[in-house]
Image: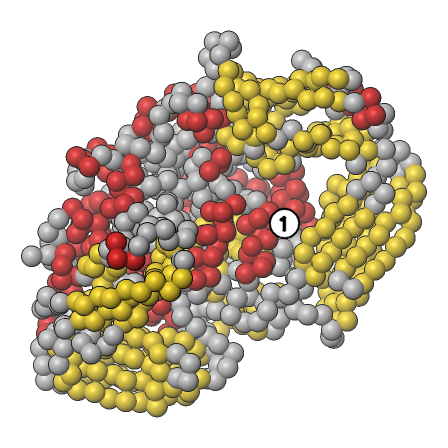
Amino acid sequence: MKIIDLSGIWNLYLDDMKEKISFEVPGDIFYALIQAKKIPHPYFGTNELDVLWLNKKDWTCFRSFIVSNEMLQEKEIFLNINSLDTIGIIEINELEVCKTDNMFKRIRINIKDYLIEGKNIITIYFFSAENKALELSKDLNMPLPHTIHPTQSMHKNLIRKVQCHSGWDWGPCLMVSGIYGDIYIGGHSHARIEYIHTSQEYKQNNCEITIFIELFSPYERKEQIKILFGNEKKIFDSKLTKGINLIREKILIQNPKLWWPFGYGDQYLYHFEIQLLEDTYSKKIGLRKLRLINEKDQFGESFTIEINNKKIFCKGANWIPIDALPSLQTPKRYKDLLEDVIDANMNTIRVWGGGQYENELFYQLCDEKGILVWQDFMFACSTYPSTKEFLDNVEQEIIYQIKRLKDHPSIVIWCGDNENVGSISWFPITKKHREFYIENYLKLNHLIRDKVKELDPQRIWWPSSPCAGQDNFTDNWHSDKKGDMHYWSVWHEEKPFEAYYDVIPRFCSEFGYQSYPSLTTVKSFTNDTDLRLESKDMEHHQKNKRGNKIIFNSIRNYFKDPNSFKAILILSQIQQVYGIKIAIEFWRSQRNRCMGIMYWQLNDNWPVSSWSSIEYNGNWKLLHYAIKECYRPIHILAYSKDNKKIEIWAINDTTQKDHGCLNMKYMNYSGEIIYEKIIDIILDPESSKKVFEKKIEPIQFDKSNHFIFLSYKNNEIEIFNDFLLTIPKDSNLQHPKFILSKTKIDKKIIKIKLNSDKPAFFVTLSIDDIRGHFSENCFTIIPHQEKEIFFITKEELKIDIDKIKFDITHLRATYD
């Protein structure tokens, strides 16, 4: 096939259609304007408000390309654009080729009749999605409400575009336009590949692969097709008619090497390739069995993902688009974030429905790393149209996305939407006419369900998140009996962190707590003179209307008043760790009843106060270090649900029995050991076990002056944890003195040794100007326990080790 690549530098017209600037494709127009210094960067200060006018603008971009006479002799010449965002008209040589209104559908259209030999011009007119949404809203025969955030582009739910482009309670309102993914012109006279996708069926020790080959032929002919799958090969001729042809072929893989999630086995991927005379397609495919165990039990109904006959405990987070400006969604950032997922002992990611179907690199990396993907369809927190026109548009989107993505072994769940069922209970009009809006909802939801069942019946289908099952409208924000749960009572309802003990979700797919970003990130969006919480810049980078109030109310409940702006930032992150750790550790101890935990949220799409564990610049918040510990395959933990007794649990997520030694120390805050107990422990594979229980009251010392320090050691690891006998505010912590030494191990690793003369809690190391993360952070250290920590940099160190200064802070340092 002959290819004309249309990526690269395009021309973008500005207002007067006289001045033009460069526009790099793939990419978005807003970023092109930033690069050309036509607008300020919207991430700094309150600049977002100064560029909102862009959301109402139309844009024109164009470029030239050369078509040879040889290309014009081909039977078909087509234009391919993976994603065009969103409302547009494409012209070639001033002739309209097509209109676009859905960024989630691939554009592939015959353009041969529009081309001439030599120089051609392709022009794309982008029309304001915000204006189009307003126009569509005037024609509604019923209100279709949606969530509204501090900076909001209205009626986002009427446009098939990334929903969070319109603003969210953690993201800016930047209604970008752009061209993403591959853009090219292809010419051919023989068959070309339209789609290739497969299904798997297991019979005893064999896997039968059904290969669906969709070919476009410009005329009736015979085509030789060659299939390569691992070591298997198949060559045959197929008689094609003009247009789209569907061919099914089967290949049997005997004793297949199976693909496993991270922590359960290898991620074996077979090479798969289709060869035609003029076209070739290849990908890597993992073979694995999959089912959802959704069975009645004594607690309600289970929700367990099973892979290769093995029940998987899912540990993960929710993923949002990695940048509000698509031009900045770079391969390196994808690789870094997904490596951070693995580094934190996760095996699951939920691609949230208010964002985007991710690019191929994302899913390929998840395949390679063994990260399970819960994949929402892109509908979130809104009511949506159910007109024939809207549903027909969505149907084509769903078909394209399923066929594009279904061969990724990492994707385990297709989920219909995020919180659309719940949204029916949020708005006055939907509550008043509930039955009507449920019927409206089901038209869209059943369309998606039917397409999933038709095109990918072997994948798990789940109607909505959260929900209790198909057409079940139970309140799964508060009910923990079945289905997946979004437990937001601690944040939105301002319940205490101990409320996490009140529920045991079968699978918690959302819960979270906000914190402020680090001082480094704050300085990236404000001036040094505005480093205060009440500054306009800080307030603008808090998109949750009640966010600051909730954070500070909780700080007053659990902690002492912070003594500086920097202490406020750090203490908010300590508080986030304190709360989320309670939830994760308790729910992990209830393994089998609870079989999945995904906190909100992994990442940020701009520098902001949010629920994330990784800041926009890639720096780990304290939460991400805590997640790394809380999600350890083997873990030891303590809690007190009723403040009357302490329970100590050991967790083993591995497939092997574990034999180790638990050491419990009852200590005072001077570092003296009051009582010590050693317990020999045998942990069954994939189990949780209560290993100790004791009433608190009989312990003859003051809870405000004592804590529990835990260590667990087997032949390979030694891990630590601790438990404060009362809330931090009532704990009489002392001022520790630290001794730190550092050694450069290689070009990217520094070894740190740390000692303390007193117990210190939430000890946090940081360093300015060098990007990287620590092997361990936000930890507890006790006297006579030397901590060995490694700092791993993103780039090679070019500074002398003696000039590198690590800052140390801890909970006691945050207040006077």
The answer to whether residue 400 is left or right of residue 68 is left
Total labels drawn:
1
* On-image quarter of the C terminus: bottom left
Q: Nearer the viewer, residue 180 or 466?
A: 180
Q: Is residue 64 above or below residue 590?
A: above
Q: In this rendering, does residue 224 appear at all? A: yes
Q: Position of residue 403 (x, y in %)?
A: 67, 47
**Which corner quadrant of the image does residue 11 belong to?**
top right
- Point out the residue furthest to the left here: 816
The answer to whether residue 543 is left or right of residue 5 is left
* On-image quarter of the N terminus: top right
Q: How is the image coloured?
A: secondary structure
Q: Amino acid at mark 1?
A: Leu
Q: Is residue 671 above or below residue 346?
A: below
Q: Residues within 10 Å of mark 1 (few under 14, many from 20)?
A: some
Identify residue for label 1. Answer: 405
Residue drawn where x is 21% and y is 49% of the image = 569
Q: At numbered mark 1, what does the secondary structure look like: helix, strand or loop?
A: helix
Q: Nearer the viewer, residue 496 or 8?
A: 8
Q: Position of residue 386 (x, y in %)?
A: 56, 36
Q: Position of residue 241 (x, y in %)?
A: 89, 38
**Which corner quadrant of the image does residue 300 belong to?**
bottom left
